[in-house]
């Protein structure tokens, strides 16, 4: 019999083809959501599937980022827990490595030739049924987008925008004791994300977040300065 190794577990070839859990990635997930995703019973027991529960954990993540990194924005953020079908409709695509989405809508006015922001709506979407560690990782990534948009508003290069978000999320993963998720970032099949994260690891290899923030500020000035 030929064996297949999945996440350090051995399965026969037929069992390896069974539906895989959206969290642990192991085949044989017994439960299927209406959006087509599968989850094993063990992961289902702790999965974040309730909006109220998710909002509470989201606020904790935002508070933790401020307490640990002294990074925050002062505007309110609308939070939504959505399934894969809604995510597909929202973002136009979905992959196992893309589990959140940041959206901002702003209004401006021009007075005496000077444009200024008068209002903004900020929304973060996170995919439902993630494990608590994966939820925190995703929420931290999207909150880093919010922070980046506030501090470095004209930085638009994908590898900088996503690299910064992945780097902040990775710091928080270590803080929460979830370093295994950071290794997954380097193995991300979406190479743009993996390469962006690796780039920011190199930028922060000496003085960590201090160097990363200095780099982003430099890119922001080079792209046209602050708004």
Image (cartoon, rainbow, N blue to C red):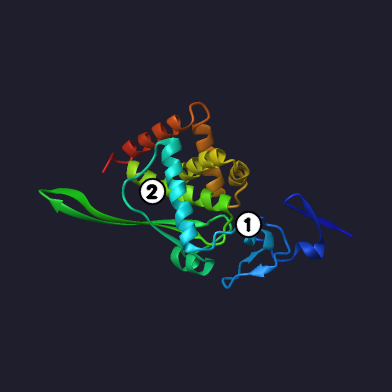
Image spot of residue 173 (x, y percent): 55, 42
Q: Quadrant of the C terminus?
A: top left
Return the disc, 1 or 2, that comes first in the chain's sequence.
1
**Element type at mark 2:** helix
Residue farthest bottom in this picture: 34
For the residues bearing labels 1 and 2, Cβ distance under 8 angstroms: no
Residue farthest top in this picture: 206
In this image, 168 relative to 114: left or right?
Answer: right
Residue 57 visible in the picture: yes
Badge 1: residue crowd in 10 Å (few <14, some 14–19, many ≥20): many
Image spot of residue 133 (x, y percent): 57, 49
Residue 153 visible in the picture: no
Relative to residue 24, is residue 209 depicted above or below?
A: above
**Element type at mark 1:** loop
Q: How far apart are marks 1 and 2 (CA)?
A: 25 Å
Relative to residue 26, is residue 112 depicted above or below?
A: above
Image spot of residue 147 (x, y percent): 38, 44
Tell me which corner region of the image, top left, top right, bottom left or bottom right, holds residue 69. Answer: top left
| Residue found 72% across the figure and 61% down from its top | 27
Q: Quadrant of the N terminus?
A: bottom right
Please give the residue where the numbered disc 2 appears in the rendered image.
Answer: 146
Image spot of residue 191 (x, y percent): 57, 49
Residue farthest right in this picture: 1
In this image, 44 relative to 9: left or right?
Answer: left
Foreground residue among 72 and 206? 72
Foreground residue among 42 and 3? 42
Tag count in the figure? 2
Closer to the eye: label 1 or 2: 1
Tell me which corner region of the image, top left, top right, bottom left or bottom right, holds residue 220. Answer: top left
| Residue found 48% across the figure and 57% down from its top | 54
Relative to residue 155, is residue 18 depicted above or below?
A: below
Please give the residue where the numbered disc 1 appears in the rendered image.
Answer: 23
């Amino acid at each position: 019999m030929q064996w297949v190794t999945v996440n350090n577990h051995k399965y026969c070839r037929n069992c390896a083809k069974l539906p895989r859990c959206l969290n642990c990635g192991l085949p044989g997930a017994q439960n299927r959501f209406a959006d087509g995703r599968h989850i094993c019973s063990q992961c289902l027991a702790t999965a974040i599937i309730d909006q109220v529960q998710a909002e509470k954990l989201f606020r904790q993540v935002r508070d933790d980022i401020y307490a640990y990194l002294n990074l925050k924005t002062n505007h309110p953020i609308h939070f939504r827990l959505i399934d894969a079908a809604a995510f597909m409709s929202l973002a136009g695509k979905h992959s196992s490595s893309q589990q959140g989405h940041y959206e901002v809508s702003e209004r401006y006015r021009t007075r005496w030739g000077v444009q200024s922001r008068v209002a903004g709506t900020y929304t973060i979407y996170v995919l439902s049924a993630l494990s608590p560690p994966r939820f925190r990782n995703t929420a931290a990534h999207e909150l880093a987008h919010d922070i980046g948009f506030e501090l470095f508003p004209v930085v638009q290069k994908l590898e900088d925008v996503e690299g910064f978000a992945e780097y902040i999320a990775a710091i928080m993963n270590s803080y929460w004791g979830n370093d295994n998720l950071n290794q997954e970032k380097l193995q991300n099949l979406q190479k743009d994300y993996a390469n962006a994260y690796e780039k920011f690891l190199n930028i922060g290899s000496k003085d960590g977040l201090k160097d990363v923030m200095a780099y982003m500020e430099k890119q922001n000035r080079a792209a046209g300065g602050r708004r």
